[in-house]
Image: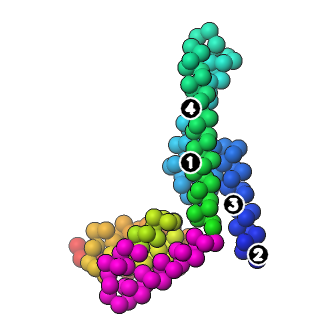
Amino acid sequence: MEHNTTERHYRRLVLLANVIAPGAGLVILRREWLGVSLAILCTLFLQVALWGFFILPASIPWAVSVLAAVAGAGTWAAAQWLGWVRACTVLGEEARQGLALLRDRALRAMEDGRFSEARELLQIALAMNDEDLEVHVLWARLLTLTGKFDEARPAWERVIRLDEDGVYRVEAVEAVDHFPD
């Protein structure tokens, strides 16, 4: 029960931040480039509209001001939509359960030597949430097991970046150290 309450508060924080500053909620949800890009676009469009309507109306054509206002509103709306979708995807209980199921099935497939099945399952899991540490660990292990060292190296580096507590750091460093040159 407490977990759901915390999740709801976090989701509200993300959505409120996104309403106040378009893209801020996406930054909180680790979509930094998307959030910052939307914030910059929205700001630029709305600045042009502000200047055209109120500050220099004689210098900026009315059509440009209207177009900038519409584009700014559209960018703001896009930031809200993407933030809401991302918050529901990352924070939703059903999504977490689905992700856990995919991880479990991928792990069993890896243990049974069904690497292509594990690869497909992990790709689906990464598409659902590409910030999930355990999915990235399984992905890196799979690439290492199948000898795809050129792909495994950046996968292990991603694990290290996502692993804030350092749980998988030793495994990642040892795996990369044992790759053939």
Residue at numbered disc 1: 35
Q: Position of residue 38 (x, y in %)?
A: 55, 42
- For label 4, the SS is helix
Q: Which residue, given by chain and number where applicable, does mark 3 sit on? A: 11
Q: Which residues are magenta?
A: 93-121
Q: Mark 1 against mark 3, which lies toward the viewer?
A: 3
Mark 4 highlights which residue?
71
Badge 1: residue crowd in 10 Å (few <14, some 14–19, many ≥20): many
Q: In the rendered view, does 41 fall on the left or right side of 22?
A: left
Is the residue marked by circle 3 packed among few (<14), some (14-19), or many (20+) residues within 10 Å?
many
**Marked residue nearer the N-terminal end (3 or 2):** 2
Question: Callout 3: helix, strand or loop?
Answer: helix
Res. 151 visible in picture: yes
Residue 35, given in percent of the width and then of the height, sits at 56, 48
Of the residues under marks 1 and 3, which one precedes in the sequence? Answer: 3
Task: Evaluate whether residue 172 shows in this view.
Answer: no
User: Is-magenta flag for residue 96?
Assistant: yes
The residue at the point 64 percent across, 72 percent down is 93
- Disc number lying in front (2 or 1): 2
In primary-sequence order, the first of circles 4 and 1 is: 1
Query: Upstream in the sequence, badge 2 or badge 1?
Result: 2
Front in this rendered view, residue 100 or 14: 100
Residue drawn at 74 percent across, 69 percent down: 6
For the residues labelled 2 and 1, the Cα–Cα distance comes to 29 Å
Residue indicated by mark 2: 2
